[in-house]
Amino acid sequence: MEEAIGGVDRVIATRYSCRSFTTTPIPKAVLEDILSIASRAPSGTNTQPWNVWIVSGALKQKLSEQLIEASRDPDAATQYTEPYPYYPQSWISPFIERRRKVGFDLYGLLGIQKGDRARMQEQNERNYLFFDAPVGLIFTTNTVMEQGSYLDYGMFLQSIMIAAKARGLDTCPQAALNPFHQIIKSQLSIGETETMVCAMSIGYANHDAPENQLRTERAPLEEWVKFLD
């Protein structure tokens, strides 16, 4: 039992958002195994509100090119909108400090100086390349589903990341692609009855990349746990 606990804990604790991958291909059978075990994630009344679109090869490259082009549009911020609100419109403490720290820490590892907009843009565009991962995953749900299904989806996504890590793969869940959901849906022939939830890069980590040294902190339990008698 202790060995099993240790194994599970180790996989969860060592998961991180990988931002640089090798191009080593992932066997289809491995992807199928990961998604099959992740499908055991719970969902309200077993609705299983997830659909997964797996993109690789020439199609992924073409999609990346379109996303980068769209992101460079001077009017991108107003022309492209997210399918649902992901972040709050008004930030408060401690969330804004945590958000900023991740950015500062990442840019520090990459040697990107404050105000270097060209390097910042270049790093942001790495999202649209799926950080060079051989496979990108696009997650959607039917438009009739409500907020509860997004809770279910979170458990499903975590299950994918943990199953991948257990198999020697790393991942990076990505909401950065959400504003361009219509482009993605068009390129992948995803119908209008589907709402994009997020994307995810999956592959074998490039351990030499400085950005993969980033490990985000977690607040101590006493900040967010209340034991009540």
Image: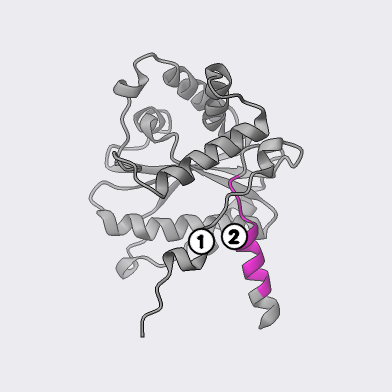
Of the two numbered discs 1 and 2 on the same chain, state the one appearing first in sequence. Answer: 1
- Labels 1 and 2 touching (C-beta < 8 A): yes
In the displayed structure, does residue 178 sit left or right of residue 11?
left
Q: How many marks?
A: 2
User: Can you identify the residue that label 1 sits on?
Assistant: 38
Whether residue 9 appears in magenta in the rendering, the answer is yes
Residue 164 seen from this side: yes
- Residue at (39%, 36%) from the top-left corner? 178
Q: Secondary structure at mark 1?
A: helix
The three-letter code of the residue at mark 1 reads Ala
The three-letter code of the residue at mark 2 reads Ala
Residue 163 — which label?
2
In the displayed structure, does residue 1 sit left or right of residue 85?
right
Whether residue 113 appears in magenta in the rendering, the answer is no
- Residue at (50%, 58%) from the top-left corner? 158
Q: Position of residue 146 (x, y in %)?
A: 25, 54
| Colouring used for the render | one colour
Q: Label 1 vs label 2: CA separation?
A: 7 Å
Q: Main secondary structure of the magenta part?
A: helix
Q: Position of residue 156 (x, y in %)?
A: 45, 58
Q: Secondary structure at mark 2?
A: helix
Q: Position of residue 76 (x, y in %)?
A: 36, 20
